[in-house]
Amino acid sequence: MFPPNIDPQLYSISAAIIGAVISPELTPNEANSVGNWLVLVGDYLLAYAGQLALIQGRMETNQNQNSQMQMDSLIEVLKRMECEIEKLKKKCS
């Protein structure tokens, strides 16, 4: 699974080390191009993850609201049933 489950500080330092290792092999224009490409990949991932989190959050909110509405309906039905049971008890007494 990527990214691996490693310490966040080590994960960040590894990116710096990789950048330091590959940058001497690139011309300034190549380094600029590769760096901008990596930033674009990161921006895409952030936008995708943010939108996905928004949608999932809305779905959870809707599910919670639906669950609450169902619970309220059940409570109302139970109250009515309780009332009817009390009426039947009074008739039988």
Image: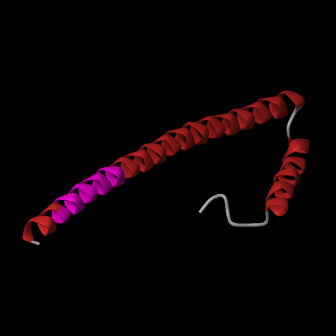
Q: Please, is residue 51 above or below residue 14 in the view?
A: above
| Residue 27 % position (x, y) | 87, 33
| Residue at the (82%, 52%) spot, across then down | 15
- Residue at the limit of the structure toward the bottom, as seen here: 93
**Quarter residue 48 falls in:** top right
Task: Using the image as rendered, state which of residue 49 and residue 10 is in the foreground.
Answer: 49
Q: Please, is residue 58 above or below residue 12 in the view?
A: above
Q: Please, is residue 54 above or below residue 93 in the view?
A: above
Q: How many marks?
A: 0
In the displayed structure image, the side of residue 72 where residue 43 appears, left or right: right
- Residue at the limit of the structure toward the top, as seen here: 29
| Residue at the (9%, 65%) spot, across then down | 91
| Residue at the (16%, 59%) spot, across then down | 84
In the displayed structure image, the side of residue 10 where residue 89 appears, left or right: left
Query: Quarter of the image containing the C terminus?
Result: bottom left
Task: Using the image as rendered, state which of residue 24 and residue 20 is in the foreground.
Answer: 20
Magenta part of the chain: 70-86
- Residue 81, magenta (yes or no): yes
| Residue 62 % position (x, y) | 42, 43
**Quarter residue 2 falls in:** bottom right
**Quarter residue 13 falls in:** bottom right
Query: Quarter of the image containing the N terminus?
Result: bottom right
| Residue 10 % position (x, y) | 83, 62
Task: Using the image as rendered, state which of residue 88 and residue 66 is in the foreground.
Answer: 88
User: Main SS of the magenta segment?
Assistant: helix
